[in-house]
Amino acid sequence: MGGLESYIYNIVKALLDKDTINSYYLFIVNNQELIYEDLLSYENLKIISYPVDCANPVIRVLCENTLLPFDIIKHKINMVHHLCSYIPVISPYKSVVTIHDLVSFYYHNKYPEYKETKRSYNYFKKVASFVTAKAERIITVSEFTKQQLMSNFRVNEDKITVIGQSYDTRKNITSINSNILEKFGILKPYILAVSVIRPHKNFDFLVRVFNILKSKYKLPHQLVVVGDVHFGAEKFFNEIKNSRFKDEIQYLGKINADELSSIYSFANIFIYPSLYEGFGIPLLEAMSFKLPVAASNAASLQEVGGDACLYFNPCDENDACDKILKILDDETLKNRLISNQKAKLDYYSWNNIAEKILSIYNGVLGNTND
């Protein structure tokens, strides 16, 4: 399950747990039924699935501008919450939209060499202009994303509400299994990093940091990286290939939830070197396993992690080494960071998030009834 599907599942479940009065409709495509099937136990939810391939943008847009508005009118739906930064052109209804990030703008400026960058930037620029004008209310997942949205589009600040997100609470902590380490060739204490592999995740930087930790500081740890490969991963793999310590770097790729839970549970420290994030879910996911976190000080990450993380400059390998070593060597610091995690996890609980979103819904529905 991807990050967006996880967000949709958890927020819909949290809304249904809190709101037994209103009826909800969840519109999905035909290869997503298994992701949301256990939500069918809620009597006030109806799931409508469309037999379309989301990977085909033409078919997706046609569906969103024909079948979707037809069903919204047919079922007399008062308001629609679009959960992934998009509102169809044909949208004869009141709407709320969640905008997670403006990463395509970051790529347009930072990585123009990737063909995906120009396509994504041009598309999002057009879509966001329409979305920000059309939506009754806009939710951004961080103050950072809110400020980016306001600086790139003419959006009234009063129209935007910052409501964070959280990690997938379905990680199975009861299935922790130390045999997983042997399966993946993890034979020593290890530093853990989890994310999709894309240029802005900065994992090539992480390998260079690891090289210094091994050569200069004789750190006994391995480096374990988990995450699916997207475009632009060649710098990361080239850094591993050229590293003197490549035999101590374990890239596991995409693994299942039970395996990931075990990998989190036995790690010594979690590192997140990203150059750009609209939020930063992996920070909270690592905290849920009481894992001390060293993170980049870029974008939204200090906002999300607060005093539960130690931060470094994601362009300065020596600074990152210093912060990692501080956590590994200073038991008092490590315990303080872990102690501060509970407040962050409580603040970003799905229950709190759903309560704030329901307040937005009630405001929009109140306008409908005026």
Image (cartoon, rainbow, N blue to C red):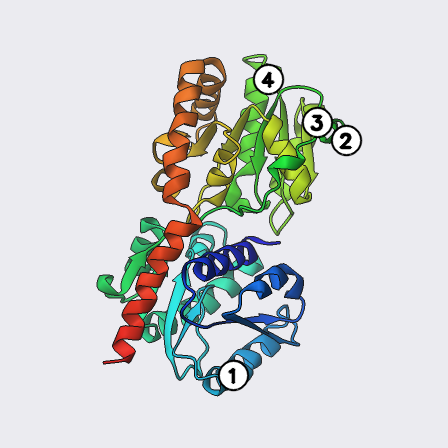
State the SS at label 1.
Answer: helix
**Rounded to the nearest whole Å, what is the CA distance between mark 4 and mark 2?**
24 Å
**Which of disc 2 and disc 4 is earlier in sequence?**
2
Seen in the picture, residue 74 relative to 5 is either above or below; the reply is below
* Three-letter code, disc 4: Lys
Seen in the picture, residue 118 relative to 331 is either above or below; the reply is below
Q: Looking at the image, which residue is at 50% across and 17% down?
A: 328
Q: Looking at the image, which residue is at 53% across and 47% down?
A: 168
Query: Residue 280 in the image: x percent, y percent?
Result: 45, 44
Per the image, the residue denoted by label 4 is 214
**Rounded to the nearest whole Å, what is the CA distance between mark 1 and mark 3?**
49 Å
**Rounded to the nearest whole Å, what is the CA distance between mark 3 and mark 4?**
25 Å
Furthest-right residue in view? 183
**Rounded to the nearest whole Å, what is the CA distance between mark 1 and mark 2?**
48 Å
* Three-letter code, disc 3: Ser
**Which of disc 4 and disc 1 is earlier in sequence?**
1
**Which of disc 3 and disc 1 is earlier in sequence?**
1
Left or right of 135, for residue 187: right
106 or 6, which lies in front?
6
Judge the density around disc 4: few (<14), some (14-19), many (≥20) Cα neighbours within 10 Å.
some
* The label number, if any, that marks residue 183 in the structure image: 2
Q: Quadrant of the C terminus?
A: bottom left
* Three-letter code, disc 2: Lys
Query: Residue 202 in the image: x percent, y percent?
Result: 52, 39
User: Which quadrant of the structure image shows residue 153?
Assistant: bottom left
